[in-house]
Amino acid sequence: MKWLVTLIVIAGLLLAGCPQPSAPPMAETPEPPAVETPADGETVPPEQYDKTWISPPSVMVGNFYPGARAEYMISMHNGNDEPAEFSVTFKDPRNTSEGFVAAPPEAKDWVIIDDPAPTLAAKETRDVLIVVEMPEYAESPPKWEFWIVVKDVTQTGMVQTELACRCLVEMK
Amino acid sequence: MKKILVLLLAVVLMLIPAGSALAATSDTVTITMTGGLLSIDATSTPDPYAFGTVVQDTSYASALTVFTVDNDGTVEADIAIHGADTTSAGTIWALQANPGADIYALDFSRNSSPGWTEFTTSDVDYMYDLASAGTDDFGLQLWTPVTITDTTNLQTAVITLTASQSLAVGAG
């Protein structure tokens, strides 16, 4: 057995020391770095590097109850060539997902946005912490929804855009 | 050697997280994130678009292909639209459903389904299920105030498109 282990070690050392054939040097075009979103660690395709986006597009908080606390991250990416200031705000949903209703009015006070006005450098991706903290004696519908809206407030055009992450809360 | 193997096996077993196989307790809040990126872009041709010199109590309509919204994300998007009061160095115009004294109104129409829909400072549905890489054109119709106090200064109006992930939609 000792003989076998010794042989494997020697073979490994020999292989590591062998010069490997390498491709001739080429001029490299810098590629945008891969970006991981918090949703499932997926890598963002390079064509999205020049776009302003958020991820995940929706979040489900399940088994929630009065007195509970949930935390999650929303990633936002500044696709501009210049730094941009963003606003991150709570919003009542324009429409709700099937089976859900709009969050009760008090829910605005249950949602904490860690950084509601981040300034992102050109092409920067940043995570913003969202905390949902429901008071112990608060009441809510069994399934409710609110939106976290991200807007580049440095937009100057006549038509501007904002991106809403659907946040769906299902009570225990 | 057998002892070493047994010891290694024991160490490996200890490193496997014991909790991974356990069911969540009843008080465990779960968070599920949907993968993908939410991203839209809006442009006008020409950019910026201007209605030009206008007079009071009159309507002006752009072509239905002046404004374009693109889904740059990886998920389908529902889109809502809202406007705002104008900004101006002089007397501003308020945006309401019907024109009045220094009050203007705005309608939009999608090129794919012509028909003017009024909108105000609150979101109204623009469209559902804009596919990833999909695009949609629209135009605007301006109703100038019945009376205009300030006939000198430029009035600038901004409209905002809000995108959310397309899910099975329930009550609004």
Image: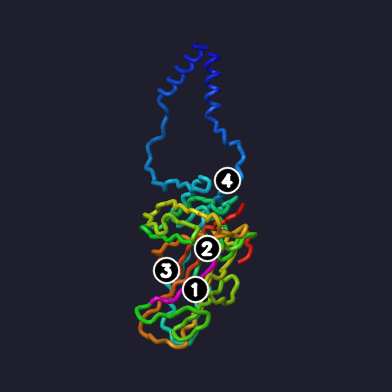
Which residue is label 3 attached to? A157
Q: Secondary structure at mark 4?
A: loop
Give the alpha-carbon distance from disc 3 to disc 4, as whole Å: 45 Å
Estimate the x, y position of residue B79 in percent, counting from the top left.
55, 65
Mark 4, other Cα within 10 Å: few <14 / some 14–19 / many ≥20: some
The tag on residue B95 is: none
Label 2 is found on which chain of the structure? A
Estimate the x, y position of residue B127 in percent, counting from the top left.
58, 67
Q: Quadrant of residue A66?
A: bottom right
Name the residue type under label 2: Glu
Magenta-tinted stretch: B78-87
Give the alpha-carbon distance from disc 2 to disc 4, as whole Å: 23 Å
Does the magenta segment cover residue B117?
no
Asked if disc 1 and disc 2 are in contact, CB closer than 8 Å, the reply is: no
Estimate the x, y position of residue A45 in percent, counting from the top left.
49, 49
Give the alpha-carbon distance from disc 3 to disc 1, as whole Å: 17 Å
Which residue is label 4 attached to? B28
Which residue is label 1 attached to? B121
The tag on residue A106 is: 2
As drawn, A6 above or below A56: above
Name the residue type under label 3: Gly
Q: Earlier in the sequence, mark 2 or mark 3?
A: 2
Does the magenta segment cover residue B79?
yes
Q: Are marks 1 and 2 on the same chain?
A: no
Q: Quadrant of residue B21?
A: top right
Give the alpha-carbon distance from disc 1 to disc 4, as whole Å: 40 Å
A114 vs B164, nearest the viewer: A114
What residue do we see at 40% from left, 25% from top?
A19
